[in-house]
Image (tube, rainbow, N blue to C red):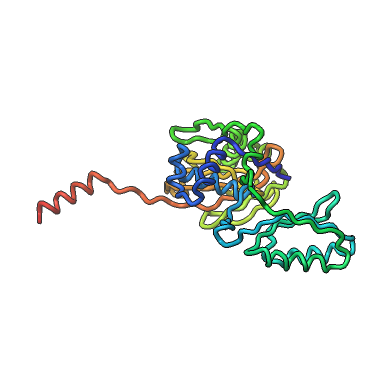
């Protein structure tokens, strides 16, 4: 079973959220420039926080400007048999915006807003007519002393250090925490390319599942170590060189996604350059799942010098 990483906020997350609390509709490019990163990094950070359910977005009205100037905190105590009816009455009222079932002397605490005192009185009378209601106390809001989104409480403890990265190649930075997974992923991919059965046995979980997506040759799903070994033994593609372009975290059941640029020699000496994306899931330091998300063949680049000469010749002839 893949171990789930504990979600957390680092310093970059805090800066991102601080900007969004002031202006939640900032473009990613502007958001990134204020944080000192690219717009793509800002977008990826925001997506990670949303997918982990660490932040949520919603529109919040200005209640007083919308005509709801009467705001109350209500406390209600009732017999056990009456709790259901009380909860239903509170839930169906459009003016009740929060209900908490609480411990102690009272059973419910609720916050409600009204356009007038008379409308508030209608709800109070309805609650008091429910059999089993023992006590209903209403407190009017006099002044709001503090109203925050909750980030101060989350950040009361010192935040974790910003995620460290190391430079894999010029311009290619990899999160430090993915370094170990990356080493296993690279060795495993090399073992498949070289049909190295011994290395695959060492690097693969016995229940490994290897999926190859079209249009890659050998597309299909290979379940179990024996199937993966047979698929690797049939591999007839020789990788001449690899360059890792990016490594990023992935969502369950995978742990990392690796983007690779490589040249390969196929049958009859055909050499092609292609972009490959691989998603990996690990168990006990070995590959448990791998998906080759397909190959994108890159066209051969034109001879710029020849193109320039032809264009110049065409202009001269004209």
Determine the residue positioned at 89% across, 60% down.
80
Q: Nearer the viewer, residue 68 or 212?
A: 68
Q: Position of residue 307 (x, y in %)?
A: 23, 49
Left/right placement of residue 73 relative to residue 182 reads: right
Quadrant location of the N terminus in the rendered image: top right
Residue 233 visible, this orientation: no
Left/right placement of residue 25 relative to residue 195 reads: left
Tally the numbered discs.
0
Q: Position of residue 49 (x, y in %)?
A: 60, 46
Q: Position of residue 9 (x, y in %)?
A: 61, 39
Residue 211 visible, this orientation: yes
Question: Which image quarter: residue 159?
Answer: top right
Q: Position of residue 47 (x, y in %)?
A: 56, 49
Q: Nearer the viewer, residue 287 or 236?
A: 287
Up-down relation of residue 113 to residue 9 (above or below): below
Quadrant location of the C terminus in the rendered image: bottom left
Q: Nearer the viewer, residue 227 or 83?
A: 83
Determine the residue positioned at 73% across, 68% down.
122
Left/right placement of residue 157 relative to residue 238 reads: right
Determine the residue positioned at 45% across, 37% down.
36
Left/right placement of residue 149 relative to residue 276 reads: right
Determine the residue positioned at 66% across, 33% down.
157
């Amino acid at each position: 079973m893949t171990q789930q990483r504990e979600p957390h906020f680092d310093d970059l997350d805090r800066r991102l959220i601080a900007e969004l609390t002031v202006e939640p509709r900032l473009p990613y490019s502007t958001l990134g420039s204020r944080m000192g990163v690219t717009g793509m990094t800002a977008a990826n950070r925001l997506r990670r926080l949303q997918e982990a359910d660490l932040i949520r977005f919603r529109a919040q009205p200005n209640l007083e400007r919308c005509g709801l100037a009467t705001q109350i905190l209500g406390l209600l105590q009732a017999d056990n048999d009456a709790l259901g009816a009380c909860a239903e009455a509170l839930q169906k009222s459009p003016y009740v915006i929060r209900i908490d079932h609480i411990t102690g002397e009272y059973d419910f605490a609720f916050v409600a807003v009204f356009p007038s005192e008379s409308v508030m009185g209608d709800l109070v009378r309805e609650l008091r007519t429910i059999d089993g209601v023992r006590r209903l106390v209403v407190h009017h809001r006099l002044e709001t002393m503090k109203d925050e989104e909750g980030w101060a409480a989350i950040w009361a403890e010192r935040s974790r250090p910003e995620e460290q990265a190391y430079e894999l190649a010029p311009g290619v930075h990899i999160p430090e925490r993915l370094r170990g997974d990356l080493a296993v992923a690279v060795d495993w991919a090399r073992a498949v390319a070289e049909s190295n059965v011994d290395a695959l046995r060492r690097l693969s979980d016995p229940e490994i599942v290897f999926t190859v997506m079209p249009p890659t040759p050998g597309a299909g799903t290979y379940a179990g170590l024996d199937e993966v070994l047979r698929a690797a033994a049939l591999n007839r593609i020789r990788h001449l060189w690899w360059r890792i372009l990016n490594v990023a975290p992935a969502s369950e059941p995978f742990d990392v996604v690796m983007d690779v640029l490589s040249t390969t020699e196929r049958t009859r000496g055909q050499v092609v350059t292609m972009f490959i994306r691989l998603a990996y899931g690990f168990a006990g330091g070995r590959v448990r799942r791998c998906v080759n998300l397909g190959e994108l063949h890159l066209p051969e680049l034109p001879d710029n010098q020849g193109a320039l000469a032809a264009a110049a010749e065409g202009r001269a002839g004209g």
